[in-house]
Image (cartoon, rainbow, N blue to C red):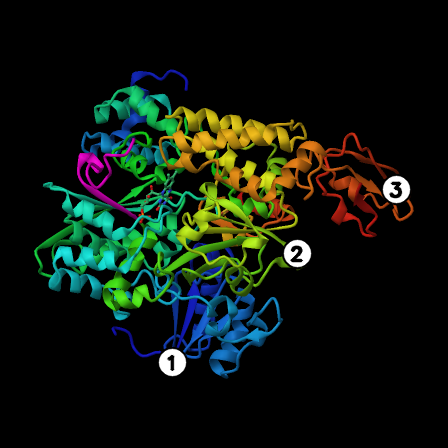
Amino acid sequence: MKDSIYRSHVLICTGTGCVSSGAKTLKDSLNEELAANDLSGEIKIVETGCHGFCEKGPIMIVYPEGVFYCEVQSDDVAEIVEEHLLKGRTVERLLFKEPMTEEQIPSYQDIAFYKKQQRIALANCGKIDPEDIDEYIALGGYEAAGKVLTEMDAQEVVDTIKDSGLRGRGGGGFPTGLKWQFAKNSESDKKYLICNADEGDPGAFMDRSILEGDPHRIIEGMLVAAYAIGADEGYVYVRAEYPLAIKRLEKAIEDAEEYGLLGDDIFSSGFNFKLHIKKGAGAFVCGEETALMNSIEGKRGMPTPRPPYPAVRGLWGKPTNINNVETYANIPYIINEGVDKFTAIGTEGSSGTKVFALTGKINNTGLVEVPMGTTLKEVIFEIGGGLGQGKKFKAVQTGGPSGGCLPEDYLDLPIDYDSLLDAGTMMGSGGMVVMDEDSCMVDVARFFLNFTQSESCGKCTPCREGTKRMLEILNRITDGEGKEGDIELLLELGEHIKSTSLCGLGQSAPNPVLSTVRYFRDEYEAHIHDHNCPAGVCSDLAGAYVIDEEACIGCSKCAKVCPVDAISGEIKNPFTIDPDVCIACGACEPECPVDAISQG
Amino acid sequence: MAEMTEEKLAEFLEPLKEILSRYEKKERYLIPVLQEAQEEYGYLPEEVMKEIALGLNLSLSQVYGVVTFYSQFHQQPRGNNIIRVCMGTACHVRGGEGILNAIKDELGIEAGETTDDLEFTLESVACIGACGLAPVIMVNDDTHGRLTPEKVPEIMAKYK
Ligand SMILES: Cc1cc2nc3c(=O)[nH]c(=O)nc-3n(C[C@H](O)[C@H](O)[C@H](O)COP(=O)(O)O)c2cc1C
Ligand code: FES
């Protein structure tokens, strides 16, 4: 270690989530406070990547005790220094409280959110300073690359990954070892390796957190893959919306070059590998592999038909292997720990773990990594702490715009690639959005279709026109103008689009609609036949609000917030809402000090 | 953009020429060049696209095709502050729409528009990747999370 010995380390998360909750100012205050107390030489502040628990940010962990503080603000710093760092007493009010039991939990490992997790891809996230290559190396980093480059031949590496059963974490779940074998078998003077960090699925942020929290793991995973297939040049395609991830990856590449871990003759093995970053320019379809390669070539990011597969004809016509960020993040573990240890985790058809971005109407939102085969219930209720405000679970959406919604009956479903497909949704990149009784499933389906429709690149007709027609029907239904036969038409269109579109975008775009019709058909019917939105979301269908004249005290608070001026009256006399003008937005209801407003 | 004299145009294009001088004349550099040019000019006026086409040995229609394909590229001047309101899934179910409406009201513009004083451009985007803090907006490179419509004026005030 190049540093002197510190008596305590204070880890502050500076991932995007915690920075937006004030982690940077927190760090500055702590620096000042430590200096003021002459502690700067004894206590070290380490900026880390994401712990996954963004909801409770900014997050601070004090080692060696491992005390986990959440929602820490600058005002709390003096107390932490005085009590914890000087007197050794935990500041209890900043500890995490379990939402179900209200119990205070001092240490990281004992919080239900972390207890059920098993971290492979996220192993170092939140533990190390992502901008310090030495910290990664100190935890065994680049050992796998060293072993592969100096002790194994390429086929051995491919076989190891094949035997591990690792499947692509970017959505499709294609066996990674097999993909590498194809690319290895292609004869060529030049091959490329790509890391797909486009992460377009709205509601997913695992790739971002890995890049921000542990960028060297991706470089190492890519190094192993490059050696296995015989590529000497690689690209990481990152979306431009992730400035911090790009910055940390740039730094990591520079440092790795300096250490001779990228460049020529790595580990004196004669193997060369150069790595570049490509910034995306804002197009969801560019996450699709052929579109992504067109985009790197400087063209419009439109998909091309496969075959030929990238392993045969990829970037600039050369054999190319493309994997997702999380896929590469698993590679060092498999090489270091061995196939048996990896296959012992997960289910038969899906080995290892999967990172999910748990969001929506849930208490503990954040990133969670669990063994494949964990049930939805365990993820949502044990790790996620259940739904907020005592609301009732209605559905969980997985797979983003390509996936679907599952109802309560499926909560015991063990999550893996195949079980989700059978249930009519998919793993996708790992977005998991929880919905409660206040979410309208028709609205959710419309939301996703609106997204895929506007992101359709327009190259093939079924996707371009078909999604548009489906969206028109859904808009009609949520506007209260649904017709007899609309549901059947949606199903028919959906099946056609799935079977005839050029790329995965169109082939999966109807899934959110098909799955919600499958499990929540009664909601569609209520919209069409009864002109009623049971969840009260589709405002054109929701009834106007009314004021109880007896209870109203004439304070005018409701009239002030009404966006359409539907409320009128005189101060100290009962107010009224004009039902023809009211858009049922509900803005007035919480304003009323005497609860006189309700939906009619 | 109004017609410029040749001299003026040459001056206007000076920074772009510097950018182009750092890249080989290859199609693969089109997107990075466009990204840098937009950083420099704030948007991509026609003169800039023409010069890029010349500089990379491409046709103007090729450049135009790429510019219109990616949502990141803009052909109109943009505000000093770019507000991106997340309309992604997590933000949608936690009330992103209400945040967008509050900002629209505050600034008096629709999504995709820029205020007359060129202070703010308002955009809706599909996910900022801070879903744990939904609903989220990004102003320039700052992320603001766990928003309610009431917090909007305070945040806007910081950038005025
Ligand atoms: C419309 C569309 C969007 C996609 N977006 C992504 C993405 O953002 N990230 C990703 O890794 N894969 C994405 N994919 C999947 C890729 O095409 C490809 O299968 C993946 O990068 C392969 O990596 P893996 O085998 O490691 O999963 C997308 C596919 C489609 C059809
Ligand atoms: S859905 Fe809004 S930040 Fe991801």
Residue A309 belongs to magenta span: yes
Figure check: A255 above or below B93? below
Q: Amino acid at mark 2?
A: Lys
Q: Amino acid at mark 1?
A: Arg
Q: Quadrant of residue A271?
A: bottom left
Q: Quadrant of residue A200?
A: top left
The secondary structure type at the circle numbered 1 is: loop
The secondary structure type at the circle numbered 3 is: loop
Which numbered tag is attached to residue A473? none
Q: Which quadrant does the N terminus of chain A fall into?
A: bottom left
In the foreground, A158 or B17: A158
Which of marks 3 and 2 precedes in the sequence?
2
- The residue where tag 2 is placed is A391
Q: Report the chain holding disc 2.
A: A
Give the Cα distance between marks 2 and 3. Answer: 36 Å
Of the two numbered discs 2 and 1 in the rendering, the one whose residue sits closer to the viewer: 2
Residue at 47%, 46% in the rendered image: A425
Q: Report the chain holding disc 3.
A: A
Q: What span is in magenta?
A: A305-323
Figure check: A577 above or below A430? above
Give the Cα distance between marks 1 and 3. Answer: 65 Å
- The residue where tag 3 is placed is A571
Image location of residue A169, percent across then percent down: 35, 51
Of the two numbered discs 2 and 3 in the rendering, the one whose residue sits closer to the viewer: 2
- The residue where tag 1 is placed is A7
Q: Amino acid at mark 3?
A: Ile
